[in-house]
Amino acid sequence: MCAAWAGSSAEALAELSAHWEAADARLHGRVHAFAEAIREGGRHYTAMEEEHAGRFTVLVPRGTGAS
């Protein structure tokens, strides 16, 4: 009886491990996609800021040393 319990325990553990590995891979993919979206948003924001810098006195082009 103990061997049967140990066998089913090992199977359950292997199943749980596979589930967590798959969940971890999905989570990693989602975090990567989110991080890429944030980076793309930052690039878009920077481009818009630089494009419109001349319209606002508080915005200056990057690298000019002005603040």
Image (cartoon, rainbow, N blue to C red):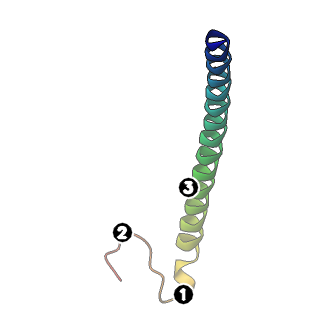
Q: Amino acid at mark 1?
A: Phe
Mark 2 residue crowding within 10 angstroms, few (<14) / some (14–19) / many (20+): few
Q: Amino acid at mark 3?
A: Arg
Q: Position of residue 59 (x, y in %)?
A: 48, 82
Residue that carries the numbered disc 2 in the rendered image: 63
Checking the image for residue 9, the label placed there is none
Earlier residue among tags 2 and 3: 3
Per the image, label 2 sits on a secondary structure element best described as loop
Checking the image for residue 39, the label placed there is 3
Per the image, label 1 sits on a secondary structure element best described as loop
Residue at the left extreme of this rendering: 65
Per the image, label 3 sits on a secondary structure element best described as helix
Mark 1 vs mark 2, CA separation in Å: 17 Å
42 or 24, which lies in front? 24
Checking the image for residue 56, the label placed there is 1
Q: Is residue 11 above or below residue 45?
A: above
- Specify the quadrant that holds the N terminus: top right
Q: Position of residue 19 (x, y in %)?
A: 68, 30
